[in-house]
């Protein structure tokens, strides 16, 4: 009997995995079949990040520090401030698959599959219902905001974070209202969020704090649950030390400019509703979740306590992204680092999928037999795929006339500047966007003295590889060699005793060496770059990021923490297996 149950469970799991894999491929297929990427938004920024990691891995270096192969090869410290761990699969696929366009799309298929699996696991763990978990995973997966992130504006980091929102919320629910001994779920959910996108992590944490305050009276065994929360937070900090410790070291040691601030692209409620009804993959919750809100309002009393909380919170968070909330009052506060209030829509989509799942499942289970349930489930899948396909075809149709990036980018020939950020990439033209870059995120976290917003001529001189030799501009593009976390400049043709302001940014822990790897004196110029003095023996100047004790400690802490956690999880799994047997 036990073996038969295990066999049925295995068959179901294999069937579910195959279903999810097929859906993951179908989601990407309309784009992949064209052999093109209809790029816009953050695409070039994300590809530069992936390219850097790919080159580091290819040369046997597995922790990126300064960018020497990408971001204009000026030693940008972008990896200190944007999490890089979650894009590792894309870098590995780049090494395996020769066609970079196919590599990117296979990465998206993998992201799709993981999104479905985590959503299913999270809801199944909470509801103990395979049907409910399957419905929820589909609603969550096909949410319009996710389509916007992945295929319209290529906000890869945020879409990767979207994978882990259900796991984080599951862990939070268990610690605060469920089984507090499952605090590891919360620590893992928040860890993977931080590995993906810092801002999404902060927004999720904010929602957790607000829910704790508002629903504090509903919490029992508060002391034990507070201890569990502390365990989850402590474990998360240990697991993310590899990123967070260098992040804070660089933040405290450098005067840098953050990515641009401001609160823009705020829709009115009418605009959000209109965009949802048009099935456009823009910053909105989408038609299915709008219908979910209507059903939730009509049948609110039929929802569970969790369903009611999720519904109310989801509606409030959705309204929060619109002009109903007085965002203008916060434009001169640190909140303007949010940039786009619609970033809350990922959390809102998750929350609204919970009551929608409850109500749909209640209806089809009570009204329909097994065969009709399967038919309705199939029709639902078809509807969700159809809506998504309609949105994807709309993207392709709108961008068919965009120019292909057929030549290497230069300051004078820079496609995104005159096509509103859109261009077409093929396998042949893919490499052209890696030679010059001044679009979204290109100068994020530059030294303040090279701030693009305030000192664009200085910034442009750096990204054009212009050095200043005794104050005279000299192009160093062909005199620069890249290695992982290191840039090498050939200065053999420059006169002795010359003062050379190199086109490489200075960050804490950067060190300067000659061709024999001996340290040489240097200073920091007014544009935030490294300056050296030429002597008769100096042929090459090497600017290299040298990991500090703090950097090495952060790696050690994270690696040891993961090993201990994995051992603990294996022990727990074996105990559970013994109990079941």
Image (tube, helix red, strand yellow):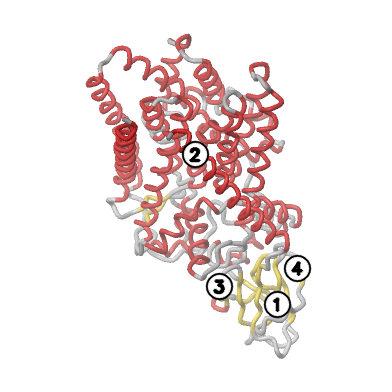
Q: In the image, which disc is placed on residue 500?
A: 1
**Percent x, y of residue 161:** 52, 42
Give the Cα separation between the discs numbered 1 and 3.
Answer: 19 Å
Residue drawn at 46 percent across, 63 percent down: 409
Give the Cα separation between the discs numbered 1 and 2.
Answer: 46 Å
Name which of mark 3 and mark 4 comes first in the sequence. Answer: 3
Residue drawn at 61 percent across, 81 percent down: 490
Label 4 neighbour load within 10 Å: few <14, some 14-19, many 20+? some
Give the Cα separation between the discs numbered 2 and 4.
Answer: 40 Å
The residue beneath circle 3 is 482
The residue beneath circle 4 is 524
Decide if residue 208 is in sight here.
yes
At mark 4, the secondary structure is strand
Name which of mark 1 and mark 3 comes first in the sequence. Answer: 3
Disc 1, disc 3: CB below 8 Å? no
Write down the quadrant of residue 80 in the picture. bottom right
Label 3 neighbour load within 10 Å: few <14, some 14-19, many 20+? some
The residue beneath circle 2 is 162
Residue drawn at 71 percent across, 56 percent down: 250
């Amino acid at each position: 009997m036990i073996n038969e149950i295990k066999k049925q469970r295995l068959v179901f799991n294999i069937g579910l995995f195959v279903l999810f894999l097929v859906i993951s491929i179908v989601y990407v297929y309309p784009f992949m079949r064209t052999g093109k990427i209809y790029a816009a938004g953050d695409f070039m920024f994300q590809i530069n990040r992936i390219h850097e990691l790919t080159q580091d891995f290819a040369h046997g270096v597995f922790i990126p520090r300064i960018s020497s192969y990408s971001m204009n090869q000026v030693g940008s410290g972008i990896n200190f401030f944007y999490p890089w761990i979650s894009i590792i699969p894309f870098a590995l696929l780049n090494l395996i698959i020769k066609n970079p366009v196919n590599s990117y799309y296979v990465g998206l298929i993998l992201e799709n599959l993981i999104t479905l699996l985590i959503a299913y696991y999270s809801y199944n763990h909470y509801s103990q219902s395979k049907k409910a978990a399957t419905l929820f995973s589909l609603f969550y997966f096909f949410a319009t905001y996710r389509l916007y992130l992945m295929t319209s504006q290529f906000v890869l980091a945020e879409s990767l974070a979207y994978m882990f929102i259900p796991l984080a919320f599951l862990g939070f629910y268990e610690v605060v209202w469920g089984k507090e001994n499952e605090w590891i779920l919360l620590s893992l959910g928040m860890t993977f969020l931080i590995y993906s996108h810092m801002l999404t992590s902060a927004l999720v944490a904010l929602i957790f704090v607000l829910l704790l305050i508002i629903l504090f009276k509903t919490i029992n065994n508060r002391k034990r649950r507070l201890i569990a929360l502390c365990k989850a937070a402590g474990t998360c900090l240990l697991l993310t030390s590899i990123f967070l410790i260098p992040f804070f070291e660089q933040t405290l040691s450098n005067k840098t400019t953050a990515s641009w601030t401001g609160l823009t692209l705020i829709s009115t409620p009418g605009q959000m509703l209109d965009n949802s009804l048009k099935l456009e993959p823009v910053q909105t919750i989408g038609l299915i979740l709008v219908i979910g809100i209507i059903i939730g309002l009509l049948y609110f009393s039929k929802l569970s306590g969790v369903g009611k909380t999720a519904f109310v919170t989801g509606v409030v968070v959705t309204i929060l992204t619109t002009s109903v909330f007085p965002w203008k009052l916060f434009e001169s506060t640190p909140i303007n680092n949010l940039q786009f209030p619609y970033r809350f829509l990922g959390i809102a989509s998750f929350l609204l999928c919970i009551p929608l799942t409850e109500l749909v499942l209640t209806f089809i289970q009570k009204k329909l037999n097994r065969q009709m349930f399967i038919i309705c489930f199939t029709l639902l899948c078809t509807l969700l795929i159809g809506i998504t396909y309609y949105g994807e075809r709309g993207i392709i149709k709108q961008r068919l006339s965009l120019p292909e990036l057929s030549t290497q980018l230069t300051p004078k020939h820079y496609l995104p500047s005159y096509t509103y950020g859109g261009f077409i990439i093929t396998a042949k033209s893919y490499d052209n966007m890696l030679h010059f870059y001044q679009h979204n995120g290109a100068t994020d976290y530059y030294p303040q003295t090279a701030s693009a917003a305030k000192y664009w001529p200085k910034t442009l001189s750096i990204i054009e590889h212009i050095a200043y030799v005794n104050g005279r501009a000299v192009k160093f593009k062909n005199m620069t060699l890249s290695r992982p976390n290191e840039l090498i400049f050939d200065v053999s043709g420059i006169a002795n005793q010359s003062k050379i302001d190199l086109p490489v940014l200075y960050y804490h822990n950067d060190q300067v060496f000659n061709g024999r790897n001996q340290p040489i004196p240097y200073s920091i110029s007014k544009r935030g770059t490294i300056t050296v003095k030429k002597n008769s023996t100096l042929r090459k100047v090497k600017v290299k990021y040298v990991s500090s004790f703090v950097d090495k400690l952060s790696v050690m802490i994270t690696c040891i923490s993961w090993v201990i956690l994995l051992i603990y999880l294996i022990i727990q799994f074996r105990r559970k297996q013994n109990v079941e047997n």
